[in-house]
Image (cartoon, helix red, strand yellow):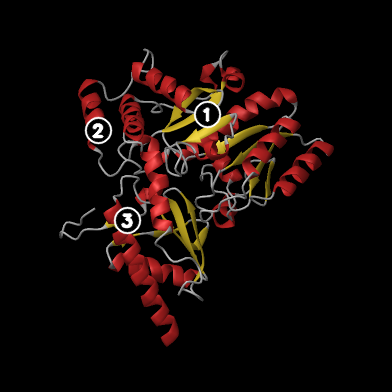
Amino acid sequence: MSTPEGQEFIDCLGGFGIFNVGHRNPVVVSAVENQLAKQPLHSQELLDPLRAMLAKTLAALTPGKLKYSFFCNSGTESVEAAIKLAKAYQSPRGKFTFIATSGAFHGKSLGALSATAKSTFRKPFMPLLPGFRHVPFGDINAMRTMLSECKKTGDDVAAVILEPIQGEGGVILPPTGYLPAVRKLCDEFGALLILDEVQTGMGRTGKMFACEHENVQPDILCLAKALGGGVMPIGATVATEEVFSVLFDNPFLHTTTFGGNPLACAAALATINVLLTQNLPAQAAQKRRYAAGRFPPAGAGVSGLVNEVRGKGMLMAIEFVDNEIGYDFASEMFRQRVLVAGTLNNAKTIRIEPPLTLTLEQCEQVLKAARKALAALRVSVEEA
């Protein structure tokens, strides 16, 4: 990235995870420009081959029995569609309750906000949708207890909605085995599993989808952000045939004017092509290993500043002891021409979420800047 004055920055924020294939990737830009010359928006009444092609591609790409896609324009729209789809499927079965997790971020439209777990975003819009419960993220016993108690009281659970890794919560990784255990509980209690991979999807964590690290297959998968290649906004709600079939009789139950438009679908198809042909998910895993071997863990000269360094693939975070030090670190990195920022639900955690196309040379520049920033903070704290 460069400013009008010619200052160059390394982007380690990545638009909160939209630039997985880099800024203005020529393959994606060219696909959108070519489509723009043909038909920018769809007619609504006629079949759109690009939308069909993208749906078929996602059916082949996504894990398990995921097959049908609803296209929209953003992550929060993708989650809204997932909630409505789960309701339509489970309402005839007498199941209306949703379980989300503490620290979760699923969006800020009304349904998605009901699953989001930050009071700052929720309070002004109370009451939100009824029937949403929250349990601690990563605590399988709490999840089991909530499912059991809901069943005992007749508030049977329609769906559990989770991020495989909490992005805005501070890049929080659950314990190994947590997601498979949640999948098993959902099967036991007849609840759907909705995985929100808006931020973790499209290669970010070292696999095309984060749930693939433990071979977890959701009933509904939410995608957005990087799906459009950093060029066009697009979201997708991908579901199994069994779940999606509730819309077959009346597909007009949930629609959107611009969802799945030709420009967005062209961008998404080109993005998937780049991710696969350049093997970017594997590159994300490789670069994570490179960075992990060169960045000091908590306690290695950063005692009193850093609680933890964590992440998976190219979704990484440094958690500081308090918000102020986190802000100071982000400012110091900016002075060194590296763009980072805090997470929405956890301000003391600075995320490092660069494009997956980041070179090893650029990776080394970022690590060098981070070490310098920590050294400057350490001096500042000692002098205070």
- Per the rendering, the mark at residue 218 is none
| Spatial CA span between label 1 and label 2 | 25 Å
The reply to whether residue 384 is in sight is no
Q: Do the residues labelled 3 and 1 touch (CB within 8 Å)?
A: no
Q: Which of marks 2 and 3 is nearer the N terminus?
A: 2
Q: What element carries label 3?
A: helix
- Per the rendering, the mark at residue 27 is 2
| Amino acid type of the residue that numbered disc 3 sits on in the rendered structure | Cys
Q: Where is residue 260 in the image (x, y as percent from the top left)?
A: 39, 26
- Per the rendering, the mark at residue 363 is 3
In the figure, is residue 379 to the left or right of 8? right
Q: Name the residue at 50% across, 50% down.
A: 167
Q: Where is residue 286 in the image (x, y as percent from the top left)?
A: 39, 47
- Quarter holding residue 279: top left
Point out the frontmost of discs 3 and 1.
Answer: 3
Q: Nearer the viewer, residue 72 or 200?
A: 200
Mark 2 Cα-neighbour bin, 10 Å: few <14, some 14–19, many ≥20: some
- Quarter holding residue 6: bottom left
| Amino acid type of the residue that numbered disc 2 sits on in the rendered structure | Val
Q: Earlier in the sequence, mark 1 or mark 2?
A: 2
Mark 1 Cα-neighbour bin, 10 Å: few <14, some 14–19, many ≥20: some
- Per the rendering, the mark at residue 63 is 1
Outermost residue toward the bottom in this view: 383
Q: Which of marks 3 and 1 is nearer the N terminus?
A: 1
Point out the frontmost of discs 2 and 3.
Answer: 3
| Amino acid type of the residue that numbered disc 1 sits on in the rendered structure | Pro
